[in-house]
Amino acid sequence: MKEDFLPSILLAISCLLIIISAIQPLARKLAVSDAVLLALVGIPIGSVATFLLRTNLASTFHSLAEALIHFPVDSQVFLYIFLPALVFHGALSLDIHRLTHDAVPVLLLAIVAVAVTTAAVGFALFPLSGVPLTACLMLGAIVATTDPSAVVSVFHDIGVDARLNSLVEGESLLNDAAAISIFTLFLHHLAYASSPHLSSAIWSFCLSFGGGIAVGFVLAESVLLAIPRLGNARVAEVTLTLALPYLAYITCDQYFGFSGVVAAAAAGLTIGNSGPAMLRPHNWSFLRNVWDQLSFLTGSMVFVLASMLVPRLILGMNGWDVVLIGVAVGAALLARGLILFGMLPALAALRLSQRVPLAYQATILWGGLRGSITLAMALAVTENPLISTDLQRFVAVVATGFVLFTLLVNGTTLRLLVRWLGLDQLSPVDQALRTQVVMIGLTDVRDKVRSLSEEYGFSTRATAYVASLYDQRAKDEEAVNTFDATLTDRDRIKLGLLTFAAHERSQLLDIFRDQGTSRSIMQNLIRTSNSIIDATRYDGRSGFLRAARHRLQPTIRFRAAQWLHATFGIDYPLMVCMTERFEIVLLKYLIFISQTRFMKERMGPVLGSRVLEVVTEITERRRALYDDALEMLRFQYPGYAEALQTRMLRQIGLRLESREYADLRNEAMIGEEIHDRLLRDLARKQGRMLRRMTFNLRTGVTNRLRELPVFSELQEAILHDVAMVVTMRFAVPGEMLLGKRHRSRFVYFVSSGEAVIQHEGKETRLGPGDAFGGDGFLDSVRTHGRVRAARFSHLLALSTSYFRELMTENPILRTKLSRPSTAEPEQLLLEHAVSAPLAATYPINPPK
């Protein structure tokens, strides 16, 4: 029999896969969840297999029936084979930006609700079950974890709001870790008769949760660092991600004692957040497709196999067991309801959380289905030889009955609840936008049909008939069009900015797909676009502008490079940061130019000319910033600017060349062999284009110093010495250069750009040739105002001590500083207040 066992197992798997392939279309036809239908199929399979094995009615199928009944699946298989893949895929599919805004509700449902549900179920069952309180609390932890697969499939079929979907998936993603941690604590107590301590349990949970996040993040970042070194091989990239969830899960669970579920989830969230900017778009699509298929097979097999275990788990169930199941279900619903309708609104009222609509709360409450994880934990109890038979039976029966109730009652009625609450309908704004877009689109299609009809010589009657169909549909849409009445100008401006930002992101992905820029630069650009889209979605116009300004601020990496340059004279890190910044600015500028046509042709007809003017004015502010940055680049580093533009134009040419070859292949002008050869040649050229460009930060420093009035009459040898010690600072608009009462160890000279001194409600603008800073030059006076960059600026900095020595050794320099200034007395006094020591060398007394 043993030699026939493996073929029987493979035959059983093949039969199950055939059944699974028919479930999805059947579920859509019957309008039920895939998971519910899989459970309904799995239970009869397990029952029939048990019947065949215990009778002689069909001895031919004994081997298949035995393979199904004794399928080599236990709690370890569920937890170590299926769970990491399912958790990783769930995290990979989550929109982390939406999840961040709902972090408080998600954590409340994933952690607090699990603890409250555990306590509610445990204390409700204790007086009725006749088993120890610890066993009842353990059962509460088992049934506290929710399974999102059945709920999400319903949401996808109906088309509910993305936020509701994110809340359900986010909760289910994290509550597994909380439930498994609590379950493990009580199981250990029952098996070894040890007393759990609340403080140690809380510390253990926090350590497990935090450690899982850290390990999952570090391993995922390691994978992301390795991906660029795989040579754009998409199969290798996918293979690396297949190993990641198991590496994270097993490492944490077996070696560190952290939560493997949290580690797999953290790894998935990290890959999902950074993957689109690290993998080429076609590689990312391939990875998502592979994981979608793997998740479907894994999830389906889990539900079928878990359902097949149901007859064995509920064997000998009696009427009192039904009462216990009802008590557990009622207590769990009551506990979740308390969190959803009590704590969640209270946190929103205190402005500690985003408000969750009442319809969402009701859906989340009724949609708390239980599935494979609950059955896997129950199975782990029945397999533990240290747990008594009575406790094993109690856990198995109540947990299995709980799962069946949620699947067969909640799961089958969830769709009706969603529709009754109106969550399957578009919001008034979305519905008005949909009608407006369809109406305009139908009119465009009608005109194109007529044009093509004339070109291809279709009959006049056929053309008129088809065009009339589109005319009628457009009129029907126009009759119910409430776009102007429903959407305020503010709504349309927000919609326009969202569309603008989303189209910009789409263009960036097109450039990345065609290998038009490096991964590091694209990662920066994609993150910028995501942050702008996210801020605009929640705060509209103000969010768009705030996010755009914030992304211009120097990063920690850039500040570190500036510090190394200024402190130790190490130029390379700053040079790398500047090359990336200049390339980003040039790409952004080109994309803004290309979006002008898109805004006029596509956004204008939908949003209206007035709103288009406002959106254009807002976006032109960003374009002006990039114009300013490019002007500074061309002025300070003309050779590098020209080389960068040349390379960018060559990359555009290679992209156009690639598309031309694709058109020739589609038109059968060339075959696959020639097309592949051409693409390989292009790939080599594109690879050379992606090599980092370098330039010397100190190029032309002597000339720039000579252009400053202070140094214009110094000897060449002295200028050369100054150029060797001067450091550079590249500032962006709005960047703080000197804070109020901040001691500056440097004298800053504006080489290009503009800075603003703000003091006592007044502003003084400093342009090329002006200076500020230098505290401690004559005394220890600190600045009283603030200095900010008004434009992209290039500053030359000399330490105060060096500048003092330079003035001592070169009297001509002190003479230049002592010449009467043409500035207004009020401005000179203001400069003195801001930078007393340096300004003190100027004549600050008003002329009599």
Image: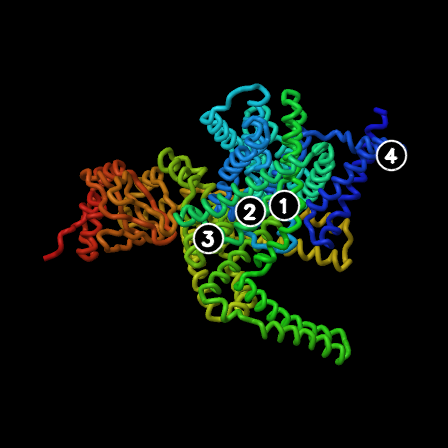
Position of residue 94 relative to residue 186, above or below, is below
Q: Nearer the viewer, mark 1 or mark 3?
A: 3
Residue underneath mark 4? 61
Task: Check disc 4 and report its element: helix, strand or loop.
Answer: helix
Quadrant of the image occupied by residue 823? bottom left
Q: Amino acid at mark 1?
A: Trp
Residue underneath mark 3? 535
Residue 829 position, x and y percent, is: 18, 52
Label placed on residue 284 = 1
Q: CA–CA distance between discs 4 and 3?
A: 61 Å
Residue drawn at (74%, 57%) of the image: 666
Q: Nearer the viewer, mark 4 or mark 3?
A: 4
Q: Residue furthest bottom?
A: 460
Which numbered disc flags the more N-terminal residue, 1 or 3?
1
Q: Name the side, left or right, on which 658 lies relative to 342.
A: right
Q: CA–CA distance between discs 1 and 3?
A: 25 Å
Viewer-side residue, 224 vs 307:
307
Task: Check disc 3 and report its element: helix, strand or loop.
Answer: helix
Which numbered disc flags the more N-terminal residue, 4 or 2?
4
Task: Check disc 1 and report its element: helix, strand or loop.
Answer: helix
Viewer-side residue, 761 vs 803:
761
